[in-house]
Amino acid sequence: MDTSICSIDGMEGILRYRGIEVEQLEQMPYDAVSYLLIYGKIPAPQELEAYSRKLREERYINREILNVLKVCNYGTEALDSLRTAVCCSAHMDEEKDDSSMEANMNKSIRLVAKFPTLVAAVHRYKTGKFLIAPDEKLSHGANFLYMLRGTVPSAIEAEAIEKDFILSAEHELNPSTFSLRITASTMADIYSAVITGLCTLKGPLHGGARKGVMDMLDEVASHENAEQYVLDKFSRKEKVMGFGHRVYKTCDPRAKLFKDIAKKLADDHGDTQWYDLAERLEQVMYREFMQNKGRPIYPNVDFYSAVVYKYLEIPPELATSVFAAGRVSGWVSHYFEQYSHNRVIRPRANYI
Ligand code: CMC
């Protein structure tokens, strides 16, 4: 399948969105990267201003959706509640019956803008807290942390969550994007496609791995226990979450960037517990994999992002949903690309 959205060099560990390396993208605001993914070019200052304004105006959630969320949020996983909320957003979209390009663009902006608000609402309801309205003065990421935690984040925290959204935004034909493209290829609507992506993201071998890493950090608790944890995993032939990748044969470039963000947060918080523990797990995994399989294994995107979430006080149950809030810009870009020169995706099976 051809794409002009993303390219990955798995041997060299290079990831580009629209031809630009993630190391450069990470220096931009999330809104600019979202625009780049969807419109295919870096926005001019006035274009970015207009796009950002629309995103800020569209952050609000309609009361009916919040009422549904309130009811369906008990005893469900956060991602399932988010999925229900996105389904309701589809029903209530004022342009739901309009499949013109203009209406689809408006829907994509609504999706990108509202995902963080929905994720924050899921969490606030689940923890019995009152909802916090979006603050249009704050950036996309900072506003999310504000709605989630109830206090305006520090500059370093705001930068960390913006970078998280950027590094989570796109990754070529990963499972959720591929499944979304299949739905798009049937000419189904944009909400159906995004909901397909959301469902596929859930699994522990894909987006769910971030929660898996957070759970592991809690279980291991201290860097002194890391070695035994990995040895036990190897002896039981179990996978360690946050390591390995189908495409990268070297370190995932996002993992390196997330590691730097985690270090900055650890130093800023004056608490290196999670960072030290993660670094020790990385060292032992590398050594054990070399000894057992004769080749290295590296952390993937979910490993150090989980450490970042620990410092940002994002609970493990919410990790996949926060991932989705960043990924939605990539998903809608793939929807448009599929839709614009479509051929139904219908692979054949090999009958045995
Ligand atoms: N821990 C221990 N062993 C591993 C791991 C791991 N994390 N990953 C791969 N291996 C071993 C695996 O047991 C197998 O060994 P053997 O050849 O002896 O059977 C070998 O490496 C190849 O494994 P595989 O599952 O066939 O590798 P793959 O390239 O098909 O799978 C993967 C890639 C990401 C599914 C896998 O590495 C994995 O399950 N990792 C843990 C889950 C995880 O972190 N997922 C996030 C993926 S990246 C972001 C995303 O897609 O959302």
Image: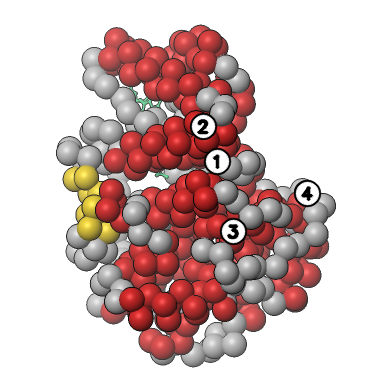
Q: Nearer the viewer, residue 40 or 91?
A: 40
Q: Amino acid at mark 4?
A: Thr
> Where does label 3 land, which residue?
144
The mark tally for this picture is 4
Q: Quadrant of the N terminus?
A: bottom left
| Label 3: few (<14), some (14–19) or many (≥20) C-alpha neighbours in 10 Å | many
Q: How is the image coloured?
A: secondary structure
The percent position of residue 332, horizontal first and vertical second, equals: 41, 69
> Where does label 2 land, which residue?
266
Which one is earlier in the sequence, the residue at label 1 or at label 4?
4
> Residue drawn at (42%, 67%), measured in percent from left and top?
31
Residue 246 as seen in the image, left or right of residue 311? left
* Image-quadrant location for residue 82: bottom right
Circle 2 or circle 3, nearest the eye: 2
- C-alpha gap between disc 2 and disc 1: 11 Å
- C-alpha gap between disc 1 and disc 4: 18 Å
Circle 1 or circle 4, nearest the eye: 1
| Label 1: few (<14), some (14–19) or many (≥20) C-alpha neighbours in 10 Å | many
> Where does label 1 land, which residue?
309
Mark identifier at residue 127: 4
The percent position of residue 225, horizontal first and vertical second, equals: 55, 12
Q: Are marks 2 and 1 in contact (CB under 8 Å)?
A: no
The answer, for residue 299, to whether it is visible in the render is yes
Circle 2 or circle 1, nearest the eye: 2
Q: Amino acid at mark 1?
A: Tyr
- C-alpha gap between disc 1 and disc 3: 13 Å
Which one is earlier in the sequence, the residue at label 2 or at label 1?
2
Is residue 124 depicted above or below 3 in this figure?
Answer: above
Is residue 122 depicted above or below 88 in this figure?
Answer: above
The percent position of residue 256, horizontal first and vertical second, equals: 33, 36
